[in-house]
Image (cartoon, coloured by chain):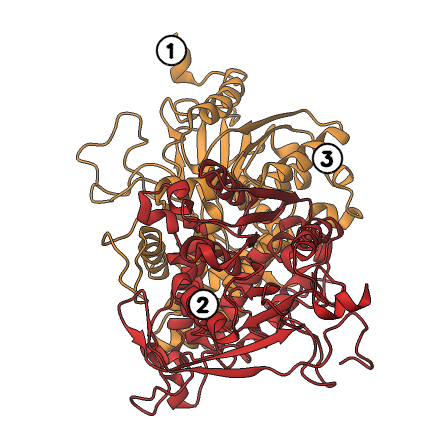
Chain colours: A red, B orange
């Protein structure tokens, strides 16, 4: 909890739930008749609505990307290091929109919401969402907010996939696409890790085929295991070595099965904390969206063909020790963009933190990303306040 | 099952259980009063007992390394590709000894054996074993077989750790040490993966704190998850891409949570098969032995100091895409050996199969390994049969 709100923070923010009552047709063939999105915004939309930036979240993310909900909040939003006045995504210049995706568990309609048809939680009957479905729902949100065209759509990991999909599905509706630590599709290894997580959750006796809400229980062990596996893959081998080495919790081996190395305790703690704050059905759904994303798949694996409709500029960023979304995957995307004749800047950032690096304000990363965002801001019609200040 | 036994096979083999009734003092401070080792041997011990090779097994291995137990056996022993007449470890020239380690679940005394003190299975009361304990038990086995000095001690992965420990603990008792796809200690990432496996097993409701034998159940889900995670880490990202790509089982996405990609079905199958054939307490114990191994730890992290007592020659082999026991770990070991002034040959084999490569007869690997073994064989006193044949 902050004693005082830092000066470069967006400060206290209040999320709002926006209701949509026009049906949203989904990739699976079903549709959502009525749905809510939980949204936060930072900064002010300028007069011609040209300064809006959409933040797309990753697997376990949500709408609360920056600032504090109240003075008791332990930590600010998940990307507070990058979003705020004077920061990389400068809220003095941009109007930043952040949402919880459909299927999420932080206020937007998802498996733990009441199904209006039954009066019970959707649970496993909630439709499987795809990245395209999310982008379609975000386009409705843009309509509602009066944003015809985003200055930029920005995302890391699964969020980067959404940014990429925006550029393909709504080419007229964004000028810049920022894809960080992401990929044009998952590898078999990535799908395999996701399947371990899904098996851990769905085989947990407390899962009850996804109807655990009615039973008043939570598949905690499954969620914990899923998070532990995930966490290992978000860190690099070197990063873990630096952070934990082979340090023993109590200084010596105890020859029993209790966690003895620091890394074991850390993972268990992270897993347990996550299992009491995240919804299992949402976790399943998010991993499926990751697995299914493959825009080139519909074009005979021709990524350049899939990217052909795009009209925006791209920034692609990867991190050297990220092995879950390796630089190789980003280079594939860059190659596809170049083959499609799209303008793209690419930066491979030297960083020991693995996939997690995309959330960390590494100087070289912030410099590249901030420089790109700054050029976008400089091309905007100045906001009235800024004009007056000149 | 073989229609006929291949000519380069050791043929039909019969394991034998060898009983020991002298107590074995263990690293944990306890001791095993009476214990059995399940053993197979291939080839003939020569007159001066100079041609014996010890095979040390990895996490899920056992004594059955080569040949067939009967004509109905689906597959030969786990390292049949390397052990046999005319093969890399040539049973026409070497007397090969392979055992199931203590704590195992294939006939040697382990958690599923009856505790003579209680008349019930040991279960979780079976002492935690270390690599040193295994090596001490293997030294007793050597005594029993009349082997004063091994021509070579050979092992991959956890087996390589045992070979390394032999060279430190019994320097006079081996002339060559072959350490394949191994490490002088696990990394934090490796410990973390092991901890996920342990949590999956021990949090399975059918685990009953390790007393599942009495309950007539098996923690199948935990074992399945442990094996799935393990399996992913034994393959390389590239290897998985080659083997599975993003192939769909039924040719198209079905928008449900059933396994849809080939890689998902494969992992589930492997996990389920393993869960019906391996003992959960043994799995826990084997992963702890891996985590605890760190001979340099007792020497202030000075690996060269730990290796100082050794008097044998070394062959160290690693595989380019092995990220569970990466070439970097092997190079650390080689650096330690060089710093300690020990004779060492090192080969880094270009192979796409990840950690699993050590079990695969990759031509360049077999050439290096076979060349090394051949030089050992050439230095032996010829066996009587060979003399007669000349």
**Location of residue B71 by image quarter:** top left
Which quadrant of the figure contains the N terminus of chain B? Answer: top left
Which quadrant of the figure contains the C terminus of chain B? Answer: top left
Q: Residue at x 60, y 43 (%)?
A: A345
**Location of residue B171 by image quarter:** top right
- Image position of A384 (left or right of A141): right
Q: Residue at x 69, y 44 (%)?
A: A350
Is the same chain shared between marks 3 and 1?
Answer: yes
Spot the residue most to the bottom: A119
> Element under label 2?
helix
Q: Nearest to the eye among marks 2 and 3: give it.
A: 2
Label 1 packing within 10 angstroms: few (<14), some (14-19), many (20+): few
Q: Chain of mark 3?
A: B
Is the same chain shared between marks 2 and 3?
Answer: no
Residue hosting label 3: B336
- Which one is nearer the viewer's eye here, A53 or B80? A53
- The x and y percentages for residue B61 are 43, 48
- The x and y percentages for residue B82 are 41, 31
Task: Determine if residue B229 is in view.
Answer: no
> Element under label 1?
helix
**Location of residue A140 by image quarter:** bottom left
Q: Chain of mark 2?
A: A
- The x and y percentages for residue A55 are 57, 65
Spot the residue most to the top: B390
Residue hosting label 1: B388
Residue hosting label 2: A139
Q: Chain of mark 1?
A: B
Is the same chain shared between marks 2 and 1?
Answer: no
| Chain-order first, disc 3 or disc 1 | 3
Q: CA distance from mark 2 to mark 1?
A: 86 Å
Task: Determine if residue B201 is in view.
Answer: yes
């Amino acid at each position: 909890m902050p004693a005082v709100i830092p000066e470069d923070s967006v400060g206290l923010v209040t999320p709002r739930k926006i209701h949509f009552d026009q049906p949203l047709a989904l990739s699976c063939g079903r549709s959502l008749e009525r749905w809510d999105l939980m949204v936060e915004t930072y900064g002010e939309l300028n007069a011609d609505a040209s300064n809006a930036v959409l933040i797309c979240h990753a697997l376990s993310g949500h709408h609360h990307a920056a600032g504090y909900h109240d003075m008791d909040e332990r930590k600010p939003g998940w990307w507070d290091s990058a979003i705020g006045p004077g920061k990389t995504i400068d809220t003095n210049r941009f109007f930043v929109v952040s949402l919880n995706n459909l299927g999420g568990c932080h206020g937007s309609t998802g498996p733990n919401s009441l199904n209006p048809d039954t009066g019970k939680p959707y649970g496993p009957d909630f439709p499987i969402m795809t990245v395209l479905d999310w982008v379609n729902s975000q386009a409705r949100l843009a309509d509602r907010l009066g944003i015809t065209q985003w200055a930029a759509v920005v995302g890391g990991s699964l969020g980067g996939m959404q940014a990429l999909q925006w550029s393909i599905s709504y080419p007229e509706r964004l000028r810049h696409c920022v894809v960080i630590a992401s990929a044009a599709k998952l590898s078999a290894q990535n799908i395999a890790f996701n399947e371990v997580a899904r098996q851990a959750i769905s085989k947990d006796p407390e899962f009850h085929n996804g109807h655990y809400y009615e039973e008043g229980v939570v598949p905690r062990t499954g969620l914990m295991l899923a998070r532990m596996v995930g966490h290992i893959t978000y860190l690099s081998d070197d990063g873990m070595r630096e952070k934990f080495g082979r340090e023993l919790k109590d200084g010596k081996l105890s020859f029993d099965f209790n966690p003895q190395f620091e890394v074991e305790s850390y993972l268990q703690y992270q897993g347990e904390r996550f299992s009491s704050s995240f919804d299992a059905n949402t976790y399943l759904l998010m991993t499926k969206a990751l697995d299914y994303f493959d825009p080139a798949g519909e074009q005979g694996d021709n990524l350049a063909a899939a990217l052909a409709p795009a009209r925006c500029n791209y920034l692609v960023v990867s991190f050297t020790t990220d092995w879950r979304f390796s630089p190789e995957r980003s280079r594939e995307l860059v190659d596809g963009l170049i083959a499609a004749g799209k303008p793209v800047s690419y930066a491979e950032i030297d960083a020991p933190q693995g996939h997690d690096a995309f959330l960390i304000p590494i100087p070289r990363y912030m410099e590249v990303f901030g420089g790109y965002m700054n050029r976008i801001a400089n091309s905007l019609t100045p906001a009235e306040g800024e004009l007056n200040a000149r």
